Amino acid sequence: MAPVSVTASRLPRTWLPAVFFSLVFSLLCAAALYSLLAEQDRSLIAQRHTAAVTAAGQNARAMARTLSWFSESLTGENFAAFQEAIDRHARQAGLLDAAVVTDDNVIVAAANPAAIGRRLQDPAWIVARGNPSGTVTPALEQGRQMLVVVEPLRREDHVMGWIRLVVAAPQNTVAPRSSEDLVRDVAMAIVPMFLLLATLLILTLQGIMRQVRSVIRRILMEAMDQPKEPAGRSAEVLNVG
């Protein structure tokens, strides 16, 4: 009976499989959480940048509409008044260029006085002025992101010209979390989960092992309590046979 007892005491340790399973499961969860956080960072930064660009475009368009409404109070094509209004607004931060362009593409008022009298030949301008409600178009010049706002100048439902504003697009200065920060954040969530899972599995396996040992012990006790037949009785049975 001793060998059976030794075999029962050599059952596998409960903490080894529990720790191994918990470690594998935690590593899989950590990889998934790392990817999720990194993607969430990129998505949030893109959303904030898009919102900032939209806000900048709306502000520039509001400025262009203010100049457009200002034109309705002028008598005739008073472009000198436009030049004065542009000089006043050109000091605002983010405004890179401003111009009033006639229907035949001639600049008649501009933040840069040297541009007055020139003909605007920008291909994007031809496309933009084709929209009667105005446009906000992203552009790139000398590696700098810009927004080009085009708003019609109307007089008695007649387009007498166009306002063209160029504003600096907001720069995306926010960077996603570094790999070290992501690993730290993931570890703060995964390590407690690993410890809790390993503890629960160890306790569960220990309970199972106690039940197994109890069953083995009961079987051994029942085997030991069974009465043995006397040797004489066995010989008698053989002789009779």
Image (cartoon, rainbow, N blue to C red):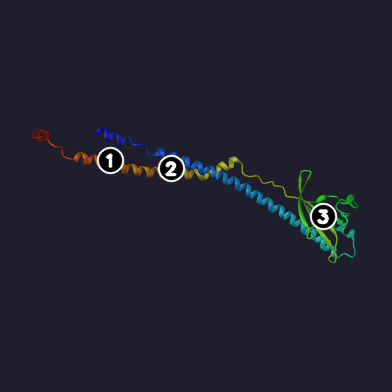
Cα–Cα span, label 2 and label 1: 27 Å
Query: Could you tell which of marks 3 and 1 lies nearer the N-terminus?
Result: 3
The answer to whether 231 appears left or right of 198 in the picture is left
Q: Nearer the viewer, mark 2 or mark 3?
A: 3
Where 135 falls versus 185 (above or below)? below
Read off the residue under disc 2.
Answer: 198
Q: Residues within 10 Å of mark 1 (few under 14, many from 20)?
A: some
Instruction: Pick the residue in front: 90 or 222.
Output: 222
Q: Residues within 10 Å of mark 3 (few under 14, many from 20)?
A: many
Specify the label residue 164 is tagged with: 3
Query: Could you tell which of marks 2 and 1 lies nearer the N-terminus?
Result: 2
Report if the CB atoms under discs 2 and 3 are less than 8 Å apart.
Answer: no
The answer to whether 195 appears left or right of 163 in the picture is left
Instruction: Pick the residue in front: 67 or 151.
Output: 151
Cα–Cα span, label 3 and label 1: 91 Å
Cα–Cα span, label 2 and label 3: 66 Å
Where 218 falls versus 150 (above or below)? above
Read off the residue under disc 1.
Answer: 216
- Secondary structure, mark 2, is helix
The answer to whether 7 appears left or right of 201 in the picture is left
Q: Nearer the viewer, mark 2 or mark 1?
A: 1
Residue positioned 66% across, 51% down in the render: 48
